[in-house]
Image (tube, rainbow, N blue to C red):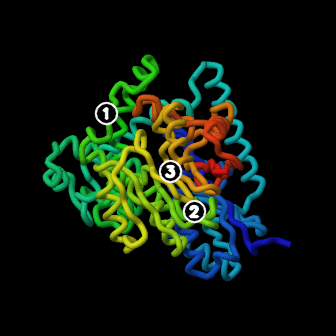
Amino acid sequence: MEPYRLHIFACDQKKPEGVPCCSARGSAKVIEALRRELAAAGLAQDVQVTTCGSLGLCERGPNLIVYPDGVWYSNVGVDDVPEIVREHLVAGRVVERLCNREPTALRVEIDGNQQKMLAALAAQDAAGVLPDDFQQAVRGYQVSRVLLTAIELDVFSALGAEARSDEVAVALGTDLRATRMLLDALVALELLEKHDSAYRNSTLAARYLAAGARDDARAALMHTAHLWQRWSTLSDCVRQGTSVTYREMVERGDDWTTAFIAAMHRNATAGAPAVVRAMGLEGVRRVLDVGGGSGAYAIAFARASEDLSVEVLDLPTVVPIAQRHIEEAKLTDRITTRVGDLRTDDFGDGYDLVLLSAICHMLGPSDNLSLLRRCFAALSPGGRVTIQDFILAPDRTSPRRAALFALNMLVGTREGSSYSSDEYRSWLQQVGFSEIRHVTPPGPAGLMIGRHP
C-alpha cells in the first residue's frame, strides 16, 4: 500500500554558477507552480511532491519523475505544469512532448553525466581547488551586503508596483549608475524581477520588504543591518577578548533601539506561544518579565491565561515601546510596565514566575549569578524561573546557531556569550533553585527552568 496515489520527485539541485542544473533553469518556480496547481485541483492530499538532488539530466532540466508510473519529464516550464496536472495526474494521460520514453538512452545520458561530475571533482581535488561550498561561504558576505544595503536604502518600497532605475534613483536620492547596478544584482538574487527596463518586487520582497506589506519586516531587519559594523570588528574582538565598539543601550540612539526591539518583537511574537505552552502556567498568577522588551512574551502570557497578571521591567528607552504594544493588544488591565535596570535593581517579591528571555547571553557569568539571585529573591516558594535563550551542548560546538551567536555577543557586549545547559544548571544550583530542567520547545532556543524550594 502507498500513502499517496502518486509521488513526484522534482529535482532542485543547485550547482556552481555556470554548471548546468535544474535550479539554474528555474526548478524552484516550476515546483511552486506544481504545488499551486495541485492545491487548485484538489490533489494536495493525493499527490506527494518531494524535491531531490540531481536526476542526472542536468542539461534538460527542470526534471520531474512521477511514480509509481515511472514517467520522466524534462524541460518542464511553469507554463507546462497545468497540462501535466490536468492530463497526467487527473486524466492519466502522459504528456508525450515532455516525456522521456527511451530508458536505455536515459541511462546512458545519466551515467555519462555522473562520470563527468566525478571526473571534474577528481580534477579539482588533484589541483587543490577549494571546495565550492567553502568558497561560497567565504563570499557569503557579498550577498548579505547587497540585501542589507537594499533594506537600508528602502529599495523595495521605492519600487512601488514597478519602476525604472532612474525613477528609483530619484526617489532614493542615489547615483543612477550605482542604483542600476544594485537593482540588477537584486534581480540576480531573485529579490527583484526585470522586464525590459523596469523592475518590480519578487513575491518574497513584496510580502516582507516593502513598506505597508502584509508582513513588513524591514524595521526588524534593520537590526541586522546595524550588526554589520560590529561583525566587521570580529578579528579585533578576538585579539582583545571583548567588544571594541561597545556602547550602553541608552547611548545607541532611537534608530538602533527601534530596530533592535522590532527584531526582538518579531521573533518573540512568533515563538512566545510555544514557549508559554512548554513551560506551563499551572499555579501561576503573577509574572515578572525581566528585560521584557516589546512586551511580546507578556502579551502571550496574558492571552494564555485570564487569571494572571504580568509586569514588564526594562530600560526607559524601551518601556514606551512595550507600552504601545500592550495598549494595541488591549491588555493594559493585566500587563504593567516598570522602568529598571536588570543588572542592578531589586525585583521585589511575591512572583510565581520570573522570565528571562534572551537576557543571559548579554551578561558574563558573575552578572548572571547576580541576576539569578535577585530572581530567586523575587519568587514565592514554589515559584519558577525560566531562562529562554540559545543553549549550547556541553562541548559548546552545537547547535550551530548558538555557537555563532556567542560571537555575536563577543562583538556586541563586554562579557556576553552563549552558554551551555551545564553552565545554566550550575548557576541555578548555586543560587538555590531545585528541580532544574532543560526543555526544548520548537525553534532555535531552549529553556532552563528552576523551582524555588
Q: Estimate the x, y position of residue 285 in percent, counting from the top left.
A: 54, 67
Question: Looking at the image, which is closer to me, 282 or 60?
Answer: 282
Residue 247 numbered mark, or none: 1
Graded by Cα atoms within 10 Å as few (under 14), some (14 to 19) or many (20 or more), the crowding at tag 3 reads many
Amino acid at dot 2: Val
> Cβ–Cβ below 8 Å for labels 1 and 2?
no
What's the distance in space between the residues labelled 2 and 3, CA to CA?
Answer: 11 Å
362 on left or right of 279: left
Residue 21 appears in the rendering: no
Determine the residue positioned at 31% across, 58% down.
321
Amino acid at dot 3: Ser
Residue 185 numbered mark, or none: none
Q: Earlier in the sequence, mark 3 or mark 1?
A: 1
The residue that mark 2 highlights is: 276
Q: Earlier in the sequence, mark 2 or mark 3?
A: 2
> Cβ–Cβ below 8 Å for labels 2 and 3?
no
Question: Please, what secondary structure does the residue beneath circle 1 have?
Answer: loop
Q: Quadrant of residue 245?
A: top left
Determine the residue positioned at 29% across, 58% down.
320
The residue that mark 3 highlights is: 357
Q: Quadrant of the N terminus?
A: bottom right
What's the distance in space between the residues labelled 1 and 2, CA to CA?
Answer: 32 Å
> Cβ–Cβ below 8 Å for labels 3 and 1?
no
